[in-house]
Amino acid sequence: MDEWIRQAESWVGQAEGWIHQQPPEQIYVAAAVVAITILLLITVSCLKSSKPNTIVLSGLSGGGKTTLFYQLRDGSAHQGTVTSMEENNDTFVLHSEQERKSKVKPVHIVDVPGHARLKPKLDEVLPKAAGVVFVVDAQDFLSSMQAAAEYLYDILTKATVVKKKVPVLIFCNKTDKVTAHSKEFIKKQLEKEINKLRESRTAISSADISDEVQLGVPGESFNFSQCLNRVTVAEGAGSTGNVSAVEEFIREHVKA
Ligand SMILES: Nc1nc2c(ncn2[C@@H]2O[C@H](COP(=O)(O)OP(=O)(O)O)[C@@H](O)[C@H]2O)c(=O)[nH]1
Ligand SMILES: [Mg+2]
């Protein structure tokens, strides 16, 4: 034991001698390099943790946003809840991931009520969004198609959504019903409706154009693949717990 200590002391002595032999500039440079490296590491870890973890549930009233919110959080639909005007806003570990042993990052989910007069709320949450789930009622689709397309058009032309390339998942809900339309049909119809909207809105005198960003490719009929941000379509049913497409979307954009 004593021998080891003596050996260690002699190494320390050697090292000290070596440091004294070096020109002081080199010592300063070495110290500066260490300091800069530490600063860089701190900055990188700060940037990482400030990545958005907010997922916005949007769509017309009655589409199933609130049901989906409860299903993601509690794994149950809370049958009997009435269509709410209030927003649900909570940060939690997805119910489907609560059993996992490894640590998972909680997700902040905001359910923005579909009522027209509450839409300014959307402008408030969109800049912080890591992704947007646009819930569509696949069963009662035809009667609400135009309104749904208008709402989606508003989201897809928001400057914050386009610039930050916020991904959008069009979730065709209520597919537990046999009369529900398929996601392919819904996608095609929404593209057609948005194409019409685009034409009619560009026809309005340029002075009162309110769209922040032009959508699609001029001269070509609109489809979602023309969007700079990724727009995908999936189907499921909030009330029966068939929400895996939404969970996958969340995990893809909010890293665990
Ligand atoms: N059949 C069926 N009904 C659903 C589904 N999801 C929601 N609903 C019903 O649709 C209605 C509106 O749902 P809600 O979550 O309040 O919609 P919100 O207005 O978008 O928040 C409620 O009566 C729900 O029970 C679903 O996946 N399948
Ligand atoms: Mg609701």
Image (cartoon, rainbow, N blue to C red):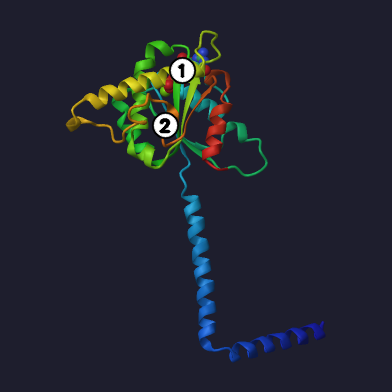
Of all residues, the one furthest to the front in this rendering is 219
Identify residue type, mark 2.
Answer: Gln
Q: Which mark is residue 186?
A: 1
| Front-most of residues 171 and 4 | 171
Q: Which residue is mark 2?
A: 226
Quadrant in which the C terminus is drawn: top right
Q: Is 18 rendered above or below residue 209?
A: below
Q: Nearer the viewer, mark 2 or mark 1?
A: 2
Q: Is residue 203 left or right of residue 111?
A: left
- Label 2 CA crowd tier, 10 Å (few <14, some 14–19, many 20+): some
Q: Is residue 187 left or right of residue 196?
A: right
Identify residue type, mark 1.
Answer: Ile
Which image quadrant is residue 229 in?
top left
- Residue drawn 35% across and 22% down? 195
- Helix, strand or loop at label 1? It is helix
| Front-most of residues 202 and 103 | 202
- Give the percent coordinates (x, y) of residue 252: 55, 38
- Residue drawn 42% across and 39% down? 165
- Give the percent coordinates (x, y) of residue 31: 53, 77
Question: In the rendered image, is residue 63 in sight?
Answer: no
Q: Is 180 rendered above or below residue 60?
A: above
- Residue drawn 42% across and 17% down? 189
Q: Is 39 rendered above or below residue 150?
A: below
- Residue drawn 64% across and 91% down? 17
- In the rendered structure, are the residues bearing label 2 and label 1 in contact, judged by CB atoms less than 8 Å apart? no
Q: Earlier in the sequence, mark 2 or mark 1?
A: 1
- Give the percent coordinates (x, y) of residue 194: 36, 22
- Helix, strand or loop at label 2? It is helix
